[in-house]
Image (spheres, rainbow, N blue to C red):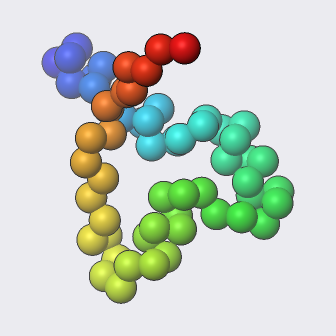
């Protein structure tokens, strides 16, 4: 059960994008988040399924 809770915590964090501060900053500018913009473009509500949500780049400076 612990691993499920860990997964759900990580998922929630990833879905917030840049976090609460970044979302609040976008909203103050009158803008939607990237995920909200994608959802607005789609015709069928709930049809967007983001894949590779946990993938991170491995680029080095």
Q: Is residue 18 left or right of residue 45?
A: right
Quadrant, the N terminus: top left
Image coords of residue 5 (percent x, y): 28, 23
Q: Measured along the vertical axis of the image, is residue 18 above or below residue 25?
A: above
Image coords of residue 54 (percent x, y): 32, 32
Seen from this angle, which residue lies furthest bottom? 43
Asked which quadrant contains residue 29, the reply is bottom right
Q: Residue at x 21, y 24 (%)?
A: 4
Q: Measured along the vertical axis of the image, is residue 29 above or below residue 11?
A: below
Q: Residue at x 52, y 64 (%)?
A: 36
Image coords of residue 40 (percent x, y): 49, 76
Q: Is residue 52 left or right of residue 24?
A: left
Instruction: From the viewer's side, name the closer residue of 45 and 38.
Output: 38
Q: Is residue 20 visible?
A: yes
Q: Is residue 55 left or right of residue 61?
A: left
Instruction: From the viewer's side, name the closer residue of 58 and 41.
Output: 58
């Amino acid at each position: 059960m612990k691993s499920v809770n860990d997964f759900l915590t990580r998922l929630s964090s990833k879905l917030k994008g840049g976090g609460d501060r970044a979302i609040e900053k976008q909203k103050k500018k009158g803008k939607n988040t990237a995920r909200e913009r994608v959802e607005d473009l789609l015709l069928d509500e709930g049809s967007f399924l983001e894949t590779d949500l946990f993938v991170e780049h491995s680029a080095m400076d």
